[in-house]
Amino acid sequence: MLTMILIVVAVILITIGLVWLVDKFIPSKFKPIINIALWVLIAFLGYQTFMSVYMPIQFNQVKEKRYAKVITSLVDIRDAQLAHRQVTGKFAGKFDGLVRFIDTAQYTITQRRDSTIVDEELTKRYTIDMFKEITIIDTLGFKSVKDSLFKGDDRYKTMMNVPDTDSQFELKAGLLDENGVNIPVFEVKVKKSVILFDQEEDLIIQENQVIAVDGVNGDAITLGSMEEIKTSGNWPKTYGASE
């Protein structure tokens, strides 16, 4: 980008020099036409220089605003998936199933308490009362998952839609073998090119190559993984907690 700006500035300076040379050495009858053409070229190159600086600034503003919306939706999806795993023991592989789950599922509200009872086996063995400690789990009631997570808001019904586009997030779920144990995993992602569909292609290509602490690395915004056990996203804290 800097190289392009320097080239354009150099061309502008050369063009101004040509204007001076024309004014000094070209016959008077040709000067007006040539001068007009050169000044038009200078104006065009000046505009190109301005746009080469302004467009990346505008792109970054659009990118940050859209990324923030996308990440807000991904956080909702993560909360819903974690609730799904807590209640069912697995993650949802389709959005319609996840939405139905939120509409109908309930958390079981329990209370754990410690108690002491007679250990009949030891009492029989030693002929005196022997006791053992146990934990009792009491069911106190049930609470709607929808009310717990979204508190009357129905945005979960559209959380599968990528904001400001006509596209949906890609969703996968399954099991990952970890030392012989099948662990539930899920992954949600959307390509940056989908989020920034109406932006300059060259700027999107540059964004796909980002490797930075304060940037979203790679060509997509992702949550979770099908290849490792995690429920975090690949965005920096400037966009919100990724855990």
Image (spheres, rainbow, N blue to C red):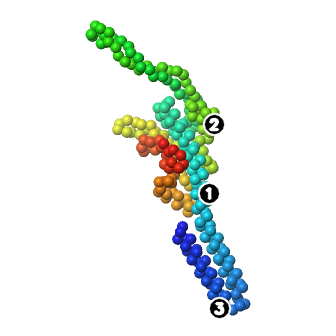
Give coordinates of residue 215: x percent, y percent. Answer: 50, 54
- Which mark sits nearer the N-terminus, 3 or 2? 3
State which tag comes first along the sequence, 1 or 3: 3
> What residue is disc 1 on?
198
Is the residue marked by circle 2 packed among few (<14), some (14-19), or many (20+) residues within 10 Å?
A: few
| Mark in the foreground, 1 or 2 | 2
Amino acid bearing label 3: Phe
Q: Residue 25 carries which label?
A: 3
In three-dimensional space, the C-alpha distance between marks 3 and 2, rounded to whole angstroms, equals: 75 Å
| Separation of residues labelled 1 and 2 (CA atoms) | 29 Å
Tag 1: amino acid: Asp
| Sequence order check, earlier mark of 1 and 2 | 2
Label 3 sits on a secondary structure element that is helix
In the image, residue 179 lies at what x, y percent? 35, 38
Identify residue for label 2.
Answer: 154
Characterize the local packing of mark 1: few (<14), some (14-19) or many (20 or more) Cα atoms within 10 angstroms: few
| Farthest-out residue, top | 127
Count the labels in the image: 3
Rendered residue at 56%/26% (across/down): 143
